[in-house]
Image (spheres, rainbow, N blue to C red):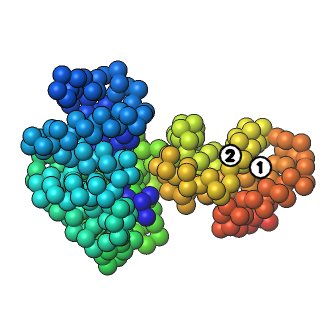
Amino acid sequence: MESDFETNSRENLKSGRLINAISNVYGDVTLGDTVIINTVDAEAADSGSLVGKAEIFLKSRADRGDEQAVFLLGQLYYEECQYAKAEEIFDSIKDTDSKALYQLAVMYFDGLGTSVDLSKAVEYMKRVASSNDPEATSVKQCALFNLGAAYLEGYGVRPSREEAERYWLLAAEDGSPSGSVKAQSSLGLFYSHPDTPDLKKAFFWHSEACGNGSLESQGALGVMYLYGLGIQKDHQSALLCLKEASERGNVYATGHLVAFYYSRKLYSNATALAKRISEYGPEDIGAMARNIECLPEYISKGIAMAMFYYARCLQLGKGAQQDMEEAKRYFSKAAQINHEVCKELQTDVTYERM
């Protein structure tokens, strides 16, 4: 379930980066007369000993009533997967620290160090989302996005597309860079869905998200330009979006870029690009989804498209030496990745559209 929800990129850091953040907040921090964390240490923070030093320092600050140190101590435990300790600390300050309340909600959503409790997770997310605390700004948009995801999938609440849309619109902040970019991108996908179709809105939200750095929406925009979905066809803009998204790791964009090259009889380009993507398998999809923050469904579509076109090039000897056995192997691999995509492409082959 963890991949369905957005964590707070400012607070949910790996230990080394968290220690760097501690150093940035407190400077060259000391315990007694001894400097235990300095800028040089923080930049190379990768050892358990440095984590231990940070723990000692934060405990000493927390014991003197430093509320920020209390949260950072809980966050340190969280990043070190000491979830029971993290939960105890976050729970002790959840009524006064929205960041702690948010982290507790994430823990209950994913069952980290505690039993999964979706109802409690939703309750805590709603409290964060409705908070007027200026310190909650960094997590408020994340909470709103996650509430939209919860309502869409029915996690701890009755499924409701209307509520999902409402929360995502709040999180998206009219496309502002300060809003949740994941919510903006999700709205683009939401309005592309057969149950809630509005391609002009989909194009708008993907444009906003792309402008704010979303790799997923950049690929989606390329596809929309390519086929005239919600916007007039524009092959130049499509090629620009697809190439840039592909270079950044968007495999869905790569699959459509392969199709574009093939349709233009640029078989060498199509084959070279497709061959690279065809090395992936089903076991790679989850890691790719986490690394590039794109939905697994679209990653599987992109890989299957690339494999199918590569197989077709091998079958016909276009852009590559003809090899019927290899073609059969890649047709089979593509079907294992995404059967529905291959079924549609096979129809194109049958009617001689490919």
Q: Position of residue 117 (x, y in %)?
A: 31, 72
Residue 149 shows in the view: no
Tell me the element at label 2: helix
Q: Position of residue 164 (x, y in %)?
A: 31, 67
Contact (Cβ within 8 Å) of mark 1 with mark 2:
yes
Tell me the element at label 1: helix
Q: Earlier in the sequence, mark 1 or mark 2?
A: 2
Identify the residue at the far bottom of this view: 158
Q: Quadrant of residue 135?
A: top left
Of 100 and 344, the residue lying toward us: 100
Left or right of residue 327: residue 158: left
Q: Eyeballing the image, is 230 above or below 275?
A: below
- Comparing labels 1 and 2, the label whose residue is closer to the camera: 2
Q: Separation of disc 1 and disc 2 at Cα?
A: 9 Å
Residue at the spot 90% in from the left edge and 54% down from the top edge:
324
Of 121 and 263, the residue lying toward us: 121
Of 143 and 95, the residue lying toward us: 95
Of 251 and 313, the residue lying toward us: 251
Left or right of residue 321: residue 145: left
Residue at the spot 20% in from the left edge and 26% down from the top edge:
30
- Give the number of marks: 2
Q: Residues within 10 Å of mark 2 (few under 14, many from 20)?
A: many
Disc 1 target residue:
310
Q: Eyeballing the image, is 331 above or below 287?
A: below
Residue at the spot 10% in from the left edge and 50% down from the top edge:
133
Dot 2 amino acid type: Ile
Q: Residues within 10 Å of mark 1 (few under 14, many from 20)?
A: many
Dot 1 amino acid type: Tyr
Q: Eyeballing the image, is 165 above or below 188?
A: below
Q: Which mark is residue 277?
A: 2
